[in-house]
């Protein structure tokens, strides 16, 4: 009975195992970072944590590859870019992300009001104007996200990227389609976002004194509109250079380079070496690096992983033993629900209400946290996220998938 309750029929549909590995790794890194909150002062920090890549940045790159690839292939398949294609793209994206988000957001608001009513104290919600911003993904549009539901900073960046990327492609197509081929228009769109956002960060980084710190650029929409574009750039390469994308030798070399650069990016930004920056007198340079070049560095390094992971179509026998492959696919499927539930709903509102009186208590809280995240996320996905997402098939046209193998013939310039 329990097996049926938590079974997601993970084998159904066309899935790429390598991309499932990336998605599962990303959410597990994120949840692992939040799990340490339960240990409080008993957490002394693990060195290997500083070598892990940024799970959110990995999500950005993977999302850009999948969503950008769908947009590019839809553009090429239709041969045009108009309001109908744009509306269909947004309909399918928002049926995937908005219902789950609004359900959890509304639940958090209701829970805060109920708790205030039961205690007879004033609620802890932000003021109405700030709260309303969460419904339109404006909570961190031009400033860092407030304390309420803070993990949604990355979702807001993604949602605004889903708006700006196709809108800019629409404008580019309208202005340049008579003179430029689609391939050049797509590349110009991607580079405009990447170069424009980096130029904006660079100019503001120069204008604001180093003493102001990193400025929270990582979590602000206006400074991170390029976040998914590095994955979109990878989708561009797969679409227009399929022979190179399918090269096994090149895939392995890019994987090695990507893993090495991602490790360097993670460690170079880790708090474990901040004291060495201070001692060497290069801390101001580090702050400037974190405001500017760090973001394209981490984005491009992770994008190098995509050709190999996209070519990893199915799990090998080694991965299938002991249910490892099935577990990875399961976590990949419920990753969005895990993202929404793990920090504020579960850690802050449930687990953190248990006092951490010892190291043992802290680790028991960590175990409880992981159990609640996995169980509740599975139930949310199976009984709400998946059924609601499937409704979009009735209200929109199916899109070509980037997960299909790359075409071998060269797309004409």
Image: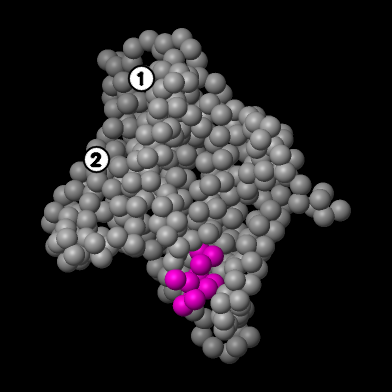
Q: Residue at coordinates 41% horizontally, 52% vertically from top-left? A: 51
Q: Does the magenta stretch include residue 35?
A: yes
Q: Pick the residue in front: 231 or 112.
A: 231
Residue 275 included in the magenta stretch of the image: no
Query: Counting other residues with Cα less than 10 Å from the Cα at mark 2, is it few (<14), some (14-19), or many (20 or more)?
Result: some
Q: Of helix, strand and loop, which one carries label 2? A: helix
Residue 239 drawn at (x, y percent) = 44, 21
Residue to which mark 1 is pinned: 183
Q: Is residue 124 above or below residue 140?
A: below
Q: Where is residue 87 shown, x and y percent of the image?
A: 49, 35
Q: Is residue 80 above or below residue 361?
A: above
Name the residue that disc number 2 marks.
196
In percent of the image, x 28 and y 48: which residue is there? Answer: 294
Q: Is 361 on the left or on the right of 227, as rendered?
A: right
Q: Quadrant of residue 136?
A: bottom left
Examine the rendered structure and indicate whether residue 174 appears above or below residue 206.
Answer: above
The spot of residue 264 in percent (x, y) is 33, 46
**x and y percent of residue 26 in the render?**
50, 48
Q: Earlier in the sequence, mark 2 or mark 1?
A: 1
The furthest residue to the right: 1
Colouring: one colour
Relative to 365, 134 lies left or right:
left
In the figure, residue 253 lies in which quadrant? Answer: top left
Name the image quarter holding the C terminus: top left
Question: Which segment did they paint magenta?
Answer: 34-44
């Amino acid at each position: 009975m329990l097996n049926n309750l938590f079974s997601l029929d993970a084998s159904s549909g066309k899935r790429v195992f390598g991309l499932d590995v990336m998605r599962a790794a990303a959410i597990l890194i994120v949840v692992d970072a939040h799990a340490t909150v339960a240990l409080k002062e008993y957490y002394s920090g693990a060195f290997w944590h500083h070598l892990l890549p940024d799970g959110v940045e990995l999500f950005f790159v993977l999302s850009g590859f999948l969503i950008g690839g769908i947009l590019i292939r839809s553009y090429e398949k239709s041969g045009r870019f108009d309001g109908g294609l744009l509306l269909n793209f947004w309909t399918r994206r928002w049926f995937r992300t908005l219902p789950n988000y609004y359900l959890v957001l509304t639940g958090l608001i209701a829970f805060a009001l109920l708790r205030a009513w039961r205690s007879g104290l004033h609620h802890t919600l932000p003021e109405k104007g700030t709260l309303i911003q969460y419904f339109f993904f404006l909570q961190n549009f031009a400033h860092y996200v407030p304390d309420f539901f803070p993990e949604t900073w990355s979702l807001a960046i993604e949602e605004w990227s889903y708006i700006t990327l196709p809108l800019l492609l629409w404008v580019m197509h309208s202005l340049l389609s008579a003179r430029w081929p689609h391939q050049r228009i797509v590349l110009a769109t991607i580079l405009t976002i990447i170069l424009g956002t980096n130029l904006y960060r660079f100019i503001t980084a120069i204008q604001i004194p180093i003493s102001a710190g990193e400025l929270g650029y990582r979590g602000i929409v206006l400074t991170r509109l390029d976040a998914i574009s590095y994955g979109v750039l990878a989708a561009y390469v797969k679409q227009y250079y399929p022979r190179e994308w399918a090269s096994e030798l090149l895939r392995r070399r890019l994987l090695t380079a990507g893993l090495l650069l991602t490790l360097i990016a993670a460690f170079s930004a880790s708090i474990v070496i901040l004291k060495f920056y201070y001692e060497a007198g290069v801390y101001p340079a580090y702050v400037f690096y974190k405001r500017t070049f760090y973001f394209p560095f981490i984005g491009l390094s992770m994008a190098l992983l995509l050709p190999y992971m996209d070519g990893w179509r199915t799990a090998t026998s080694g991965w299938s033993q002991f249910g490892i492959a099935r577990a990875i696919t399961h976590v990949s499927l419920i990753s969005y629900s895990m993202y929404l539930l793990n920090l504020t709903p579960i850690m802050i509102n449930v687990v953190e209400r248990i006092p951490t009186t010892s190291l043992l208590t802290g680790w028991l809280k960590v175990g409880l946290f992981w159990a609640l995240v996995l169980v509740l996320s599975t139930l949310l996905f199976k009984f709400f996220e998946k059924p609601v997402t499937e409704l979009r098939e009735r209200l929109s046209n199916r899109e070509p998938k980037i997960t299909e193998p790359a075409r071998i013939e060269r797309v004409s310039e």
